[in-house]
Image (tube, grey):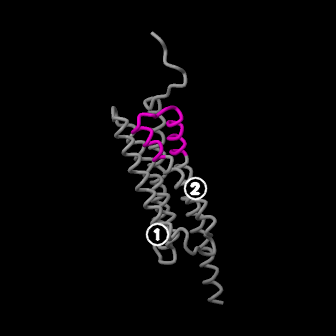
Amino acid sequence: MVAPPVHTVTIEQFHDFFLLAGTAAATLMGLLFVSISLHLEMVVHDRGRHLNAMAWESFYGFIEVLAISLMFLVPETPLRMLGIQLITLGSIRLGIMLINSRHLLGPGDAVVTRKVLIRRFLPHVVANVFLILVGRKLITGTMDSDGVSMLVTTIILLIITATGSAWDLMIRIGRLKMLQSREAGQGIE
């Protein structure tokens, strides 16, 4: 019996990775819910549309990692079906990002600049393009160790950018509240 080449990688070998990524995404999503609920008035206010868009991008990033992890944890799912699911998910996310971009790339405020919003927005685009490419590899049967590496990179990129966006959101809400309380204090004097 001949052993498979060392570079051969199967999706089953990444079971623990998908389990950990899904768990991390679910946990971080819960923390995002809690933090937003504490400052909901800032996120839902008309002047906070960019904050709302940042919150949605974080949320969608965590949902996406959770969905990918769940897809790959289902036993014996045909690779072609996984490919279709990844392409569908990536395409839907790119469409949602296009819709949200009008708020993300629109006028910011004293705390949130366009540069910050673009820095948080572009990695999500890259991750979803990677997701579509991995889906294509799965459908065409050309999935190899490079494709698996691209999938792992996509998941890590989504977790990092969603977490970073959530962190930026919290810091920016805090700074906006400080600015508002300073302005309110100056108005009273």
Q: Is residue 31 above or below residue 48?
A: above
- Residue range in magenta is 131-156
Name the residue that disc number 2 marks. 164
Residue 11: percent from left, percent from top: 44, 32
In terms of depth relative to the viewer, which is nearer, 45 or 33? 45
Q: Does residue 10 appear to the left or right of 164 in the view shown?
A: left
Q: Is residue 179 above or below residue 139?
A: below
In terms of depth relative to the viewer, which is nearer, 135 or 122? 135
Please tell me which residue is depicted at 46% across the width and 57% down the height of the picture: 94
Please tell me which residue is depicted at 62% across the width and 70% down the height of the picture: 113
Residue occupying the far front of the picture:
140
Q: Is the magenta stretch mostly helix, strand or loop?
A: helix
Label 1 or label 2, whichever lies nearer to me, is 2
Neighbours of disc 1 within 10 Å: few (<14), some (14-19), many (20+): some
In terms of depth relative to the viewer, which is nearer, 160 or 115? 115
Q: What residue type is labelled 1?
A: Leu
Residue 44: percent from left, percent from top: 45, 72
